[in-house]
């Protein structure tokens, strides 16, 4: 088991179709102690997540759930305190929380821009900042930030310029953390997914989706399980000498 007894905080795991949930499920298979964080987390959602993971791994497991609005720094600090109170430490942060919008740049209002940056970029910053305090003290830890193909190509297949900019900022943040905290044995990496079968694709028409898939070298969408596999690699010692990297999980949509 690649993550035996490691405490892994996975943010953005509220939907059973999400990358965050799939990551929690795979990490549990590999022996991790799972903490799921979401702005919508409550007892009912936690029970649903725990039940689904237990059914998959075919054994009883304990999952801690924490409600957190990552756009607020004090909420991220409180989340970390809640985790430490139960788990005693944190070994890995996977940040897969985020929102996506598709407006043309000239139609994006100040309010919409603020919302995008508050969650996708400032939220990532506050989460990393809060967890890094724990990592710096123990001189170890791994951060995995879920960015987007949109950050690399300038606009996404489903996201607008404000979405691309927020995810581009996440890539720069990840590299900065890797450079600053590498001497302490702390690693930070990012993943740029595209066309993963999550609720983000639900707004695409059948014809639009078919046209996009035709342009993908692998000729299909990706699965959340495949994204979780990349997260597992970056969270585990398999990637012990990897930091500041951006891993593409896009079926060949963007080869560069």
Image (spheres, rainbow, N blue to C red):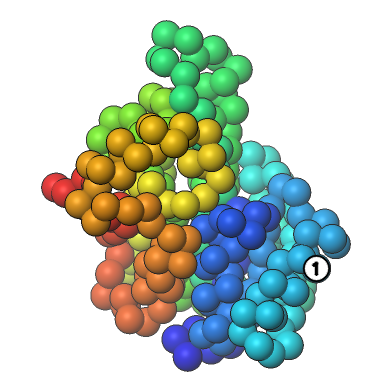
Asked which secondary structure carries label 1, the reply is helix
Question: On the picture, is 39 further left or further right than 219?
Answer: right
Residue at 73% from the left image edge and 88% from the top image edge: 60
How many numbered discs? Answer: 1
Question: On the picture, is 45 further left or further right than 35?
Answer: right
Report if residue 71 is visible in the image.
Answer: yes
Residue 231: x, y in percent? 42, 67
Residue 139: x, y in percent? 46, 75
Q: Looking at the rendering, which quadrant does residue 133 occupy? A: bottom right
Residue at 40% from the left image edge and 15% from the top image edge: 105
Q: Looking at the rendering, which quadrant does residue 49 occupy? A: bottom right
Judged from this view, the residue extending furthest toward the left is 256
Residue at 24% from the left image edge and 56% from the top image edge: 218
**Disc 1: CA contacts within 10 A as few (<14), some (14-19) or many (>=20):** some
* Residue 135 in the image: above or below residue 55: above
Q: Looking at the rendering, which quadrant does residue 245 occupy? A: bottom left
Judged from this view, the residue extending furthest toward the top is 106
Q: Which residue is mark 1?
A: 47
Residue at 52% from the left image edge and 75% from the top image edge: 26
Residue 233: x, y in percent? 37, 74
Report if residue 127 is visible in the image.
Answer: no
């Amino acid at each position: 088991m690649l993550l035996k007894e490691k405490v892994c905080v996975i943010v953005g795991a509220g939907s059973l179709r999400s990358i965050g949930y799939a990551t929690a499920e795979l990490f549990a298979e590999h022996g991790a102690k799972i903490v799921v964080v979401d702005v919508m987390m409550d007892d009912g959602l936690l029970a649903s997540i725990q039940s689904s993971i237990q059914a998959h791994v075919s054994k009883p497991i304990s999952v801690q759930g924490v409600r957190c609005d990552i756009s607020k720094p004090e909420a991220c600090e409180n989340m970390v305190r809640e985790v430490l109170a139960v788990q005693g430490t944190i070994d890995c942060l996977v940040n897969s929380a985020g929102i996506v919008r598709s407006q043309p740049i000239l139609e994006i209002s100040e309010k919409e821009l603020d919302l995008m940056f508050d969650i996708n970029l400032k939220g990532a910053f506050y989460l990393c900042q809060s967890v890094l305090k724990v990592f710096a003290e123990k001189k170890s830890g791994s951060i995995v930030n879920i960015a987007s193909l949109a950050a690399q190509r300038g606009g996404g297949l489903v996201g607008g310029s404000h979405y691309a900019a927020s995810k581009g900022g996440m890539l720069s943040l990840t590299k900065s953390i890797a450079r600053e905290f590498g001497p302490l044995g702390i690693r930070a990496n990012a993943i740029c997914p595209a066309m993963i079968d999550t609720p983000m694709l639900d707004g695409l028409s059948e014809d639009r989706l078919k046209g996009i898939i035709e342009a993908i070298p692998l000729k299909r969408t990706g699965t959340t399980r495949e994204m979780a596999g990349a997260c597992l690699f970056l969270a585990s010692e398999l990637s012990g000498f990897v930091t500041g990297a951006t891993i593409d999980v896009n079926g060949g949509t963007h080869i560069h």
